[in-house]
Image: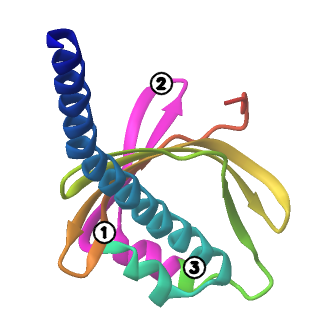
Amino acid sequence: MEAFKKRISTILLLTMLFLGLAPTSLLAQHEAQEVEQVIRSLFEGMKLKNPNQVSQAFYAEGLMQTVIQKVEGTTVGSNTVADFVNRIASTPADVVLDEQILSYHIQVDGPMAAAWTPYRFYRNGVFSHCGVNSFQLVKMAEGWKIVYIIDTRRKEPCEY
């Protein structure tokens, strides 16, 4: 009888631990899906040349940077969100910018998230370059916003 009580106690303890952790795990999964949707919306807005959709993905004071590799060495170029949105808005009608995300690796800790997204970029259906985006997002009152992006760009290799 004592062994039976110990087994029941163990089962109850494990059940309580599982139930206690399950909501946290489900919440993190839901938050990761929301983060992914913000990133998808950004690139959809870019492809559609919709500056409002693009700007809605960002925190207004967000920062955008690119790792630039040259023979002389590596540097970092910077851009404001406003400049990026203006470039999207002024893209000629006959130009299609299509950044295709290959996978999403998202980590969430409360109101902060990081996303690592390998990509291939096409201009008018022609391969331009590939690389990786590293996003930092914060959950604001109005939802997840991109506060920082840094990316790499290269012609090859493009295997991920």
Asked if residue 52 is positioned above or below residue 39 in the image, the reply reads below
Q: Amino acid at mark 3?
A: Gly
The quadrant in which residue 46 appears is: bottom right
How many marks overall? 3
On screen, residue 54 versus residue 114, left or right, reads right
Residue furthest to the front in view is: 1
Q: Nearer the viewer, residue 10 or 103?
A: 10
Check residue 72 for magenta coloring.
Answer: yes
* Residue under pointer 1: 144
Q: Nearer the viewer, residue 25 or 104?
A: 25
Q: Which residues are magenta?
A: 59-87
The residue lying at 61 percent from left, 74 percent from top is 44
Dot 2 or dot 1, earlier in sequence:
2
Badge 1 amino acid? Trp
For residue 78, say whether it is visible.
no
Q: Name the image colouring.
A: rainbow
Q: Which mark is residue 45?
A: 3
Q: Secondary structure at mark 1?
A: strand
Residue at point 40%, 52% (across, down): 29
Residue tagged 2:
72
Disc 3 + disc 2, Cβ < 8 Å: no
- The residues tagged by marks 2 and 1 sit, at their Cα atoms, a distance apart of 38 Å
